[in-house]
Image (cartoon, helix red, strand yellow):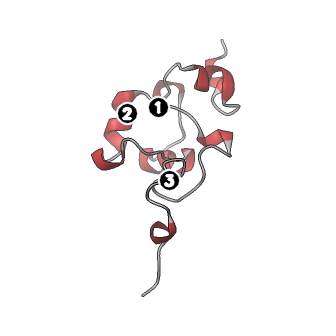
Amino acid sequence: MKKSIHDSINKNDRRRCRMCGTCCLVYTKHYFMLKDNLWKKICPKEFQKDMLCMDCVEKKLGRKIQLKDLNDSPLNVEINPYTKPFFKD
């Protein structure tokens, strides 16, 4: 039987994307925060304490991340080089 990427992901490592296994802390693009209502909508209840990388979030949304999707935490506004531009006037 062929193993999937999910078989090799350490289920206790919450720093990795629950869908693809990408490390969400090393690649700052993938360390961001969605608004709570959107997170609850796209992420199954049993995974809500885990992480999803930006690529997998965009796949679930069927589009690129937009300002309306992101909360205004310092992580998004000041730290993540991908989300920072969304918050510039």
**Number of disc labels:** 3
Q: State the image coordinates of residue 28 (x, y, percent, origin top left).
A: 67, 39
Which of marks 3 and 1 precedes in the sequence? 3
Question: Mark 3 sits on what residue?
Answer: 13
Element type at mark 1: loop
Q: CA distance from mark 3 to mark 2?
A: 23 Å
Q: Residues within 10 Å of mark 3 (few under 14, many from 20)?
A: few
Q: Nearer the viewer, residue 7 or 29?
A: 7
Q: Residues within 10 Å of mark 1 (few under 14, many from 20)?
A: some
Q: Nearer the viewer, residue 3 or 88?
A: 3
**In the image as oriented, which residue stretches furthest toward the left?**
45
What residue is drawn where x is 58% and y is 55%?
22
Eye-nearest disc, 3 or 2:
3
Would residue 32 appear left or right of 69 to someone viewing this image? right
Which of marks 2 and 3 precedes in the sequence? 3
Q: CA distance from mark 1 to mark 3?
A: 20 Å
Q: Which three-letter amino acid code belongs to the residue tagged 1? A: Leu
Locate the C terminus and report the quarter of the image it occupies.
Answer: top right
Element type at mark 3: loop
Q: State the image coordinates of residue 52 (x, y, percent, origin top left).
A: 49, 47
Q: Which three-letter amino acid code belongs to the residue tagged 3? A: Asp
Q: Nearer the viewer, residue 65 or 34?
A: 34
What residue is drawn where x is 34% and y is 29%?
37
Q: State the image coordinates of residue 56 (x, y, percent, origin top left).
A: 50, 51
Query: Do labels 2 and 1 touch, CB within 8 Å?
Result: yes
Would residue 39 appear left or right of 29 to someone viewing this image? left
Q: Residues within 10 Å of mark 2 (few under 14, many from 20)?
A: few
**Numbered label attached to residue 80:** none
Question: Mark 2 sits on what residue?
Answer: 38
Locate the N terminus and report the quarter of the image it occupies.
Answer: bottom left
Question: Mark 1 sits on what residue?
Answer: 34
Q: State the image coordinates of residue 65 (x, y, percent, origin top left).
A: 53, 36
